[in-house]
Image (cartoon, rainbow, N blue to C red):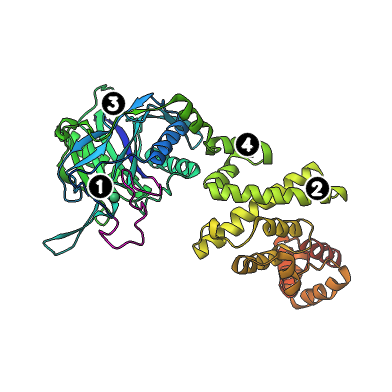
Amino acid sequence: MTTYETIIGLEINVQLKTKSKMFCSCDNDSNNAKPNTNVCPICMGHPGVLPVPNRQAIEWTIMTGYALNCQIPETSKFDRKNYFYPDLPKGYQISQFDQPLCNGGYLDINISGENRRIDLERIHLEEDAGKLTHLANQDYSLVDYNRVSTPLMEIVTKPDFRDPAEARFFLQELKNLIRYIDVSDANMEKGHLRCDANISLRPIGEKKLSPKTELKNMNSFKAVEKALMYEIKRQTELWEQNDSPKKQTTRLWDENTGATREMRSKEESHDYRYFPEPDLTPLRLDPGWVAKLKQALPELPAEKKQRFIKQFGLSEKETKLIIVDRLISEYFENVMTETSSWVEELKQTEKVSDEGYLKIVKLVFNWITSELFALLKQEKISISKCKITPENFAELCAMIYTNKISSSGAQQVLKIMFDKGSDPSQVVDEQNLTQVSDEKELDSIIDKIIKENPKPVQDFKSGNQNALQFLVGQAMKESKGKANPKIVMNILKKKLS
Ligand SMILES: [Zn+2]
């Protein structure tokens, strides 16, 4: 039996969040606009109007190019791509053909410990088309031109992927990177980021590429992976029946059936009759100007990861959890800055050694990635809407570290802070949650627990350590989360031995 190699390439369209559209002054955000109201003679392609390129969109494309290690040429130009489609009122799209803004480039990804470099072909800038809505059981479709001519950056990879999971992983990393540069929200569900995938198979050992199939209409990373997996299965069967794809086709992914279906034979680039856009002059990219754009790039995820590992002593795996989102990484860093100032105070009373500092970092890290993440997920809100200020979060962690509150007490405090944005010390006072470490006060609680739980007491005495944990838990409950669990355990051990 012949085995086959999978060849996958991606074309990713990223909607840039500039203020205005690509070639006119229409608002680029049509979220709250009625259909077909956010348009003008320029984006509707009326005769005699002239487009003016959006400088911000060009700058952001070049910055993305630098973040992806591309070469930026000294000249670039726009071209006219001719085709007729109901969502394209001009009858052509302004795109870039042979002189894109960015050439080459790559993104390094790490999949389960293995480094992979994915090479890029190019990044170019173009205008988007409108949006068609096809209604079920109707013989007409609706068109909304608000999206016409919004700036789209197209990132084209080389056919470097060998596996659908790699493609999905790449998309996640790319999305993260784009959000760091802050040129797009890159939300795939909302259509800010769209991805077409090209896939073909070939017998292992064969060097020539077979005609590719273009997959469209996937609107989540998971869907990209699923569509590719479906297509591998379908094409493998064709190869085995000696009926491999002989020409390029485009297929649509259907999320409901979990299958792809043929839409059309794929156009070749000569079908589009590209020619230089006569209404726009070529672009000369001044080296001094592009150098400034490179300098304006923020710290990117890969650099931030290395810095966090070094600065906070976190592991690579832990750091990944924090840097996966720029806003979360900033929140964490702000909490750490606030934390450092109380650590300095604690150092004066000699309560914190260097080892202690690492413990504090771990504590802050754990409270963010487990407790805070859980609340954000449960309430479905993003970190940018979180009511807890980094200063208050750091203060809560300080109270946990210095045993002012127990871990279960801190969970209650965190929930109130999360709902109301309150100050932790105020919540602790109001809720009377200050941890009880006084042995005399705890004594009576523990006596009660021993009296009420003869079976676990007996179990512990005959060597069952779990029984001790159970008794500590009961004491914590009895004290309404206020008892210091370490001291409870010590008293219990003393009383039962
Ligand atoms: Zn317009």
* Marks 2 and 1, the one that precedes in the sequence: 1
Q: Which residues are magenta?
A: 16-38
Q: Is residue 231 above or below residue 486?
A: above
Q: Is residue 256 above or below residue 53?
A: below
The Cα–Cα distance between marks 1 and 3, rounded to whole angstroms, is 51 Å
Q: Residues within 10 Å of mark 4 (few under 14, many from 20)?
A: few
Evaluate if marks 2 and 1 touch, with contact meaning CB atoms under 8 Å apart: no
- Side of 339 relative to 346 (left or right): left
Nearest to the eye among marks 3 and 2: give it.
Answer: 2
Q: Amino acid at mark 2?
A: Glu
* Marks 3 and 2, the one that precedes in the sequence: 3
Evaluate if marks 3 and 2 touch, with contact meaning CB atoms under 8 Å apart: no
Quadrant holding the C terminus: bottom right
Mark 4 beta carbon near ligand 1 (under 8 Å): no
Label 4's element? helix
Q: Is residue 257 magenta?
A: no
- Side of 135 relative to 9 (left or right): left
Mark 1 beta carbon near ligand 1 (under 8 Å): yes
Nearest to the eye among marks 4 and 3: give it.
Answer: 4
Tell me the residue that label 2 is attached to.
344
Question: Foreground residue, 429 or 223?
Answer: 429
Q: Main secondary structure of the magenta part?
A: loop
Tell me the residue that label 4 is attached to.
307
In the rendering, which numbered label is found on residue 341?
none
* Marks 4 and 3, the one that precedes in the sequence: 3
Nearest to the eye among marks 2 and 1: give it.
Answer: 1
